[in-house]
Image (spheres, rainbow, N blue to C red):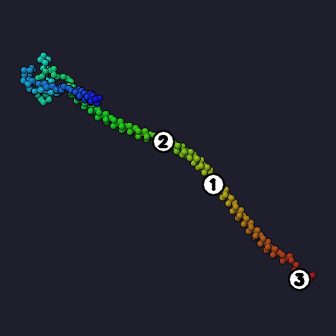
């Protein structure tokens, strides 16, 4: 029983909602175009649709009619009250929808540009971080190079001092070698002189000794 009542209530709600749809009256208006200023003149155009853009040729405030020219080149008269300086709501709606479409297209383009700019910003941010890290690394390496360069300069200065000291020692060694050779030559010369003197002394002794030795003949006479 309760299920049947519940079904009836649901059907009632659905039927009410089905009959509550909104409807609109069509705003299309057809205005006849006549050959003169008044309803008694011949109709030259059966009906101009509302929203049509017309060229105003003349306006008569007393009769309340205006002479117009249609886009198709037809001239005629119609009541001025049907004319307005602004487009009708339908045209404005079409224009508004077109503007909305253009704005949506522009918005979509701007979103794409924003996404591209955001990606570029992220890329630049990453590049900046990498560059900062590389810069810090280069700074440390530069400081290390400066320290090594300072040590290298000190080593180079010490190397120059050692080379100069080595040159001085080499010069002293050459002087000592020269002096040694001179002394050696002098020693050899003295040895030769001594040897010559000894030879000469031996010769002298060999000549003198026989002269001072007594002869055997003299001994026999004695």
Residue at image location 63% in from the left, 54% down from the top: 167
User: In this image, 98 relative to 135: left or right?
Assistant: left
Looking at the picture, does residue 210 appear above or below residue 93? Answer: below
Label 1 – label 2 distance at C-alpha: 50 Å
- The image quadrant of residue 168 is bottom right
Residue 59 versus residue 174: which sits nearer the camera?
A: 59
Mark seen at residue 167: 1
Indicate which disc, 2 or 3, sits on the residue closer to the N terminus: 2
For label 2, count other residues whose C-alpha is less than 10 Å away and answer few (under 14), some (14-19) or many (20+): few
Residue 49 versus residue 73: which sits nearer the camera?
A: 49
The answer to whether the residues at label 1 and label 3 have Cβ atoms under 8 Å apart is no
The answer to whether the residues at label 2 and label 3 have Cβ atoms under 8 Å apart is no
Residue 100 versus residue 65: which sits nearer the camera?
A: 100
Q: x and y percent of residue 180 in the render?
A: 70, 61
Q: Which residue is mark 3?
A: 217
Label 1 – label 3 distance at C-alpha: 79 Å
Which mark lies nearer to you, 2 or 3?
2
Q: x and y percent of residue 179 in the render?
A: 69, 60
Mark seen at residue 131: none
């Amino acid at each position: 029983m309760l299920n049947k009542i519940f079904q009836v209530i649901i059907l009632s709600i659905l039927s009410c909602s089905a009959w509550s749809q909104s409807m609109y009256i069509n705003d299309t208006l057809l205005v006849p175009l006549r050959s003169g200023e008044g309803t008694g003149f011949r109709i030259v155009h059966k009906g101009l649709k509302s929203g049509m853009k017309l060229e105003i040729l003349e306006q008569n405030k007393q009769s309340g009619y205006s002479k117009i020219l249609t886009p198709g080149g037809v001239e005629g008269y119609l009541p001025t009250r049907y004319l307005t300086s602004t487009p009708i709501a339908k045209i404005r709606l079409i224009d508004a929808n077109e503007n909305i479409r253009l704005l949506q297209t522009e918005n979509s383009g701007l979103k794409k540009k924003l996404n591209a700019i955001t990606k570029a910003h992220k890329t630049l941010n990453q590049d900046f971080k990498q560059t900062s890290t590389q810069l810090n690394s280069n700074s440390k390496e530069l400081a290390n190079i400066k320290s090594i360069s300072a040590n290298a300069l000190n080593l180079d200065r010490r190397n120059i001092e050692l080379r100069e000291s080595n040159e001085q020692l080499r010069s002293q060694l050459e002087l000592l070698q020269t002096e040694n050779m001179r002394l050696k030559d002098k020693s050899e010369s003295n040895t030769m002189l001594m040897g010559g003197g000894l030879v000469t002394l031996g010769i002298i002794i060999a000549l003198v000794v026989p002269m001072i030795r007594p002869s055997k003949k003299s001994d026999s006479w004695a």
